[in-house]
Image: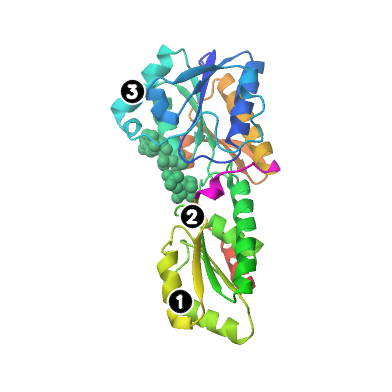
Amino acid sequence: MAKQIKTIGVLTSGGDAPGMNAAIRAVVRTALNLGLKVKGIMRGYAGLLQEEIVDLESSSVSNIIYHGGTILYTARCMEFTTPEGQQMGAEICRKHGIDGLVVIGGDGSFRGAGKLAALGINTIGVPGTIDLDIACTDYTIGFDTAVNTAMEAIDRVRDTSTSHERCSIIEVMGRNAGYIALWCSFANGAEDVLLPERYDGNEQVLINRIIANRKRGKKHNIIINAEGIGHSTSMARRIEAATGVETRATILGHMQRGGTPTCKDRVYASIMGAKAAILLSEGKTNRVVAYKHGQYVDFDIQEALQMKKDIPEDQYEICKMLVQ
Ligand code: ADP
Ligand code: F6P
């Protein structure tokens, strides 16, 4: 028989992402509506192990939906990757009467969530990362805001790049995934894009294209480089030396993680947060909420973690046709 849940906890873990606050708000208000009590766990698993646990009411999540970041703060926690840390986490949940937990984060956070579920704490994951690198879902909280922020920043770099007739290498985040880079290559009309999933390291191809572009009168040359490839500054130096075209590197960095969440991130995060609270109220555990083929669905955590994701080949082919 499904375990009767009375009190749930919610935490954010790993890198923050715009829209996490909308998810927290939805978890809290949905759970309260279902007659559950809600506790906020500060600073992810680190705060759980430190017992940084607060009661959350409906008013605790007022006026947060339009703010970036996470009101619960977030952290990475090595101790929680150990069996002892996980055991302690489960005991602390029991001590505080937390019999269900929503974990908002990425794959790493879901591994931790799976461990807590195995130790008897009903746990549901909600995908929160700007990287879009969670295989079971077509949407992750924060990607839409991050990619719009990066797009606007790249437009600005493009203006100055054109004025100075320069080549610009612009590095975007994404860890080992190239989704932000791919989307920016489309949205910014880039001259080239380097994705960790596809780049073979052949810089000569890049150099030849810059020279050819310059010969046919291109004033700027925007190259989007994914963080997973990195080394933008040294790449810029080598490209300038080989092409004779003045080249600058811009690393967009953490500005991509902040700022007001887009409408899409607020709406999808709200629905996912609410779904997570509903799953807990139904006695479900060890699930991840996902958005797949236009539907909100949920998967077993271990199955979700085993799924593989790659840049869709048709999108990459179109991207290659459009960059020039
Ligand atoms: P993300 O959730 O964004 O992928 P991380 O990979 O940094 O971010 O993971 C966030 C946290 O999740 C880690 O700091 C750690 O506390 C926890 N975590 C990661 N991997 C595991 C694991 N294998 N077992 C238990 N907890 C884990
Ligand atoms: O996972 C989100 C992300 O911003 C990645 O794109 C990046 O690789 C990483 O986090 C940066 O982590 P930190 O904030 O610890 O520097």
Q: Nearer the viewer, residue 81 or 51?
A: 51
Mark before the other along the chain sequence, 1 or 3: 3
- Please tell me whether residue 11 is drawn above or below residue 196 in the rendered image: above
Q: Nearer the viewer, residue 197 or 55?
A: 55
Question: x and y percent of residue 9 in the render?
Answer: 51, 21
What's the distance in space between the residues labelled 1 and 3, CA to CA? 52 Å
- Please tell me whether residue 8 is drawn above or below residue 188 in the rendered image: above
Pointer 1 with pointer 2, Cβ within 8 A: no
Which quarter of the figure is the C terminus placed in?
Answer: bottom right
Which residue position holds label 3? 87
| Amino acid identity at mark 1 | Ile
Q: Assess mark 3: CB under 8 A from ligand 1?
A: no
Q: Could you say whether the residue bearing mark 3 is in a helix, strand or loop?
A: helix
Which residue position holds label 1? 239
Question: x and y percent of residue 88 in the render?
Answer: 34, 21
User: Residue at position x 64%, y 52% from top?
Assistant: 148
Residues in magenta?
Answer: 254-263
